[in-house]
Amino acid sequence: MARKILVSACLLGHKVRYDNGDVPCLDPRFIRWYEEGRMVHICPEVTGGLPTPRPDAQIVGDRVLTGAGADVTAEFEKGAQAALKLAKEHEIALAILKQDSPSCGTLRIYDGTFTDTLAEGQGRTTALLRDNGFKVFGEDQLDEVERELASIDGASR
């Protein structure tokens, strides 16, 4: 049986983003993994208690703040913990999360200045998953995901 993949819900077309939008990943590999029943989805921000739509938030120092200065760190941490629990329950092989997000960014996130400036970094959920030994990729890293899944699937046969 193919191992499961934890996925940001917005990549599957769920309207959970801060702006009530979605960003479906239309890559044929992503769609195939979905059709194989491999995907377990979550939006850590919604699971953590934030509404849709909601104010844009960014990591500022060790906190997560909205542009108006509201501290939403607790909700981001609650969502990250829920994602970790889901990953463990489903024994996921890896995660594909939404790049640039303060929850899910894997290589880069917005820099905390609310000026649409990206910087190297990772979101709160990505960091927690990685700290617990899970491999996490962005939707723009599907070549790496494909190689990792081939390695994992080949080893389990």
Image: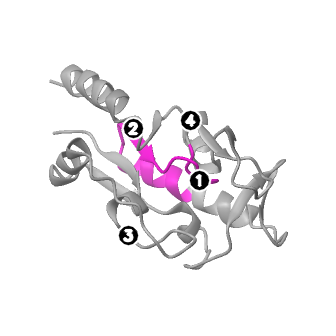
Badge 4: residue crowd in 10 Å (few <14, some 14–19, many ≥20): some
- The residue at the point 61 percent across, 74 percent down is 49
- Callout 3 secondary element: loop
Viewport quadrant of the N terminus: top left
Instruction: Give the labeled residue for mark 1.
Output: 101
Q: Earlier in the sequence, mark 2 or mark 3?
A: 3
Instruction: Please identify, in this view, whether the residue under mark 4 or under mark 3 is nearer the observer.
Output: 3
**Image position, residue 140 (x, y; %):** 42, 40
x 39%, y 38%: residue: 94
Magenta region: which residues? 82-105
| On screen, residue 135 above or below 16 | above
Q: Is residue 59 left or right of residue 129?
A: right
**Residue placed under numbered mark 3 in the picture:** 14
Residue 130 shows which numbered tag? 4
Side of 46 relative to 36 (left or right):
right
| Contact check, label 2 and label 3, Cβ < 8 Å | no
Judging by the rendered image, the residue that carries numbered circle 2 is 94
Tell me the amino acid under the disc marked 3: His
| Label 1 or label 3, whichever comes before in sequence order | 3
Q: Which SS class for mark 1?
A: loop
**Mark 2 or mark 3: which is in front?**
3
